[in-house]
Structures are given as structure tokens and as C-alpha cells.
Image: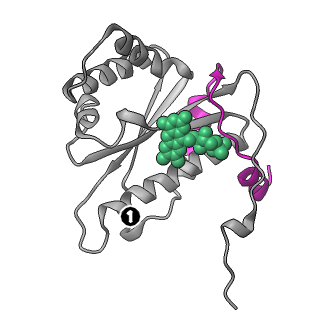
Amino acid sequence: METLKAIQTRNSVAHLSEPAPSIEEMEEVYKGALRAPDHAWLRPWKYIEIRGDARKKLADSFIKASISSGEEMTDELREKLEKAPFRAPMVIVLAADIKEHPKVPKIEQIISLGASGQNILLALHDIGYSAVWRTGKMAFNKHITEALELPPNYEVIGYLYVGTPSGNIKKLPELDLTNHLTRWE
Ligand SMILES: Cc1cc2nc3c(=O)[nH]c(=O)nc-3n(C[C@H](O)[C@H](O)[C@H](O)COP(=O)(O)O)c2cc1C
């Protein structure tokens, strides 16, 4: 696919089923992810790729994080968290390995990981898969960092749910560029 066309036609898909991309396909996708812009080359990008039965471990981490954040673990909430990772055949956790740097604040490192996440979405679209980026309560807090057994300086910024579209694909929105762009002359 032509690069610009891929960028213009990427579409988030919530209903995802098998197959997920293969390990080999994902290696190519990550090569694209690792080309995100990165101030001072700090390489803040960490990905945890979770598929198949390993999604149960992710559900367990969600439950652990929820309990340690003080939420009441009702049967309903437990069931919701148990099901969450199974909404797609593969989930990629985006975690920022935040470093102290005199010129590169945390926000820049998170933006860099965000850019790499977008590269992943675009690369997946280019090779015929779909995905959706999700956050919610399982992002941006120390409880999920701990539950995923990541070092304390890591910040979980989101989850890419990945697979093959099942069901309807939404129409791409038609946006008016004039609402977003100012040209100085
Ligand atoms: C940082 C970030 C977090 C998001 N979190 C969620 C989320 O938790 N749940 C959700 O339904 N959509 C979430 N979204 C939005 C979807 O990923 C998606 O962008 C949205 O459904 C619009 O679809 P589109 O990307 O095809 O325009 C998030 C997007 C971003 C960039």
C-alpha cells in the first residue's frame, strides 16, 4: 500500500478475531515502531505482546491492579476484567521506560512511545490487519505498572488490541481541515 494512502485509510476496529499477525509479521511491524522520533535517542519504547492463553495472565494483572488501586472487586467487575484481554486475539501493552534526562522530560518520552504506537497501527493496517488503541483505568498508574511486574519507572500508556476485523467496519469520518489548520502568510 502506498504510504500516504495507508495513513489516510487507517481505521480503528473494535471487533477483532483470529488470525492475529504472525511473529514474523510482527517483527516487521516493530521495525516500523522503532522508527518513531526520539529526543536524545532515549529509546523509551517497550512492548509486551500477549496472545492466546497468555491473555489470562493479562486479565490476572488487571484484577490485581484494580484491587491494589482500592476498587471493590465485585463479581461484575471481575468478569469485565477477565474478559477484557479476550476482545482480540493479540494485545500489545505500550510501556514507556522513562529515564531522567536534563533535556528530555517524561512527556516527550511518552509522546515518542505514542508515535511508535501509531506506527504500529499504520504498519498493521498496511499488511491487512486491524487494531484499536485503548487505555481506561489500566493505564497511567503505578498499580498496573506493579501488576505487570515492570520496573517502577515504567509508565503503561495504553493497549493495542490487534487482529482481523469481524463485523462491520465503521465509515471513515470526513473532517473539515479548516477546523484544524491555520496558514500564516
Ligand atoms: C491514547 C488513546 C487512548 C484511547 N483509549 C480508548 C479507550 O480506552 N476506549 C476506546 O473505546 N477508545 C479509545 N481510544 C480511541 C480509539 O483508539 C480510536 O481512536 C477511536 O475509536 C476513533 O477511531 P479512529 O481511530 O478510527 O478514528 C483511545 C485513543 C487514544 C489515542
Above-or-below relation of 53 to 24: above
Nearer-the-camera pick, 95 or 66: 66
Side of 17 relative to 49 (left or right): right
Q: Name the residue type under label 1.
A: Glu
Where is residue 149? Give x, y as percent. Answer: 24, 32
- Residue lying at 68% horizontally and 34% vertically, measured from the top left: 129
Quadrant for ligand 1? top right
Say if 51 sits above or below 44 in the image: above
Boundaries of the magenta span = 1-29
Asked if the magenta segment contains residue 7, the reply would be: yes
- Side of 116 relative to 62 (left or right): right
Relative image position of residue 2 (x, y in whole percent):
80, 54
Secondary element under disc 1, as helix, strand or loop, is helix
- Specify the farthest residue to the top: 75
Asked if the magenta segment contains residue 161, the reply would be no
Residue located farthest toward the front when viewing the structure as drawn: 179
Residue of label 1: 108
Quadrant in the rendering for residue 137: top left
Residue at horizontal 51%, vertical 52%? Answer: 116
User: 172 or 51, which lies in front?
Assistant: 172
Residue at the spot x=19%, y=26% of the render? 68
The colour scheme used to paint the residues is one colour
